Amino acid sequence: MERGRGGTAGSSELFAFNQLRARKKELKFSRSPIHDWGLYALEYIPAGDMVIEYVGEVIRQQVADKREKVYERQGIGSSYLFRIDDDLVVDATMKGNIGRLINHSCNPNCTARIITINGAKKIVIYAKTPIEPGEEITYDYHFPIEQEKIPCLCGSDRCRGFLN
C-alpha cells in the first residue's frame, strides 16, 4: 500500500489544485511494459505541475485490510489501495479514476503528495521532472518493508529490484 507524504495546502497549492480541476491534463491509459496498464501523457507537463488527483473511496485502515483479503480471495489481480495517513486509505479498486493506473518506478517522473483542501485530504500526483508526450507517468510506491518481497519490473537503471 502506498505511503503518502502529508501537508496542508497553502494558497498557491489550493489555486493549483483548483486549476487542475478546471483544466485537466491530457492523459490516456495504454498497455505498459512495467505492469499491465499504465498512464501516459498526451501533452508536455512541466516539472512541478499537478498531473492528476488519485481518486477513490476513502476508508479506514481496518476496512482496507479486510478489503485487501477479499480482493485476493476474489482473484482481483490488482488492488488500488493508497494510504493517506495511519487511519485513512483511498481504495480506487472499484471506485476510482485513471490515476490508479500509474505504475511504480524506482526512478519516477512524478511524486505523490497528500494535501488538505477545505479539511479533506487529497492525494495529488505532481511531475518531478518534465514529462514529454507519450511518456509513461510513474511514481515510487514507497511500499513498507514486508516479509514477502514484491519484485519490481520498472526497468529503470536505478531499479532496486523490489517495490518494498
Image: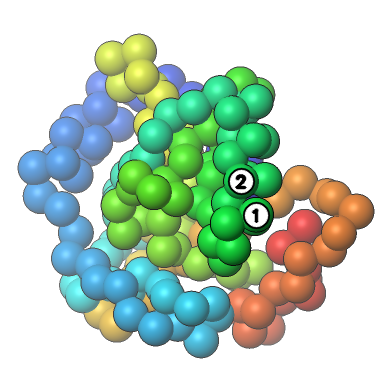
Tag shown at residue 111: none
Q: Residues within 10 Å of mark 2 (few under 14, many from 20)?
A: few
Mark 2 = which residue? 70
**In the rendered image, the vertical position of residue 25 relative to residue 146, given as above or below:** below
Give the SS element for disc 1: helix
Kind of residue at disc 1: Arg
Question: Splitting the image into 4 quarters, where does residue 41 fall?
Answer: bottom left
Q: Residues within 10 Å of mark 1 (few under 14, many from 20)?
A: few
Question: In the rendering, at what x and y percent does residue 13 appear?
Answer: 30, 31
53 or 11, which is in the foreground? Answer: 53
**In the rendered image, the vertical position of residue 51 relative to residue 124, given as above or below:** below
Q: CA distance from mark 2 to mark 1?
A: 5 Å
Question: In the rendering, at what x and y percent does residue 149 appear?
Answer: 83, 63
Question: In the rendering, at what x and y percent does residue 5 appear?
Answer: 56, 35
Residue drawn at x 47%, y 36% is 90
39 or 81, which is in the foreground? Answer: 81
Kind of residue at disc 2: Val
Q: Quadrant of the C terminus?
A: bottom right
Give the SS element for disc 2: helix
The residue furthest left is 22
Residue drawn at x 46%, y 59% is 110
Residue drawn at x 58%, y 56% is 74
Mark 1 = which residue? 73
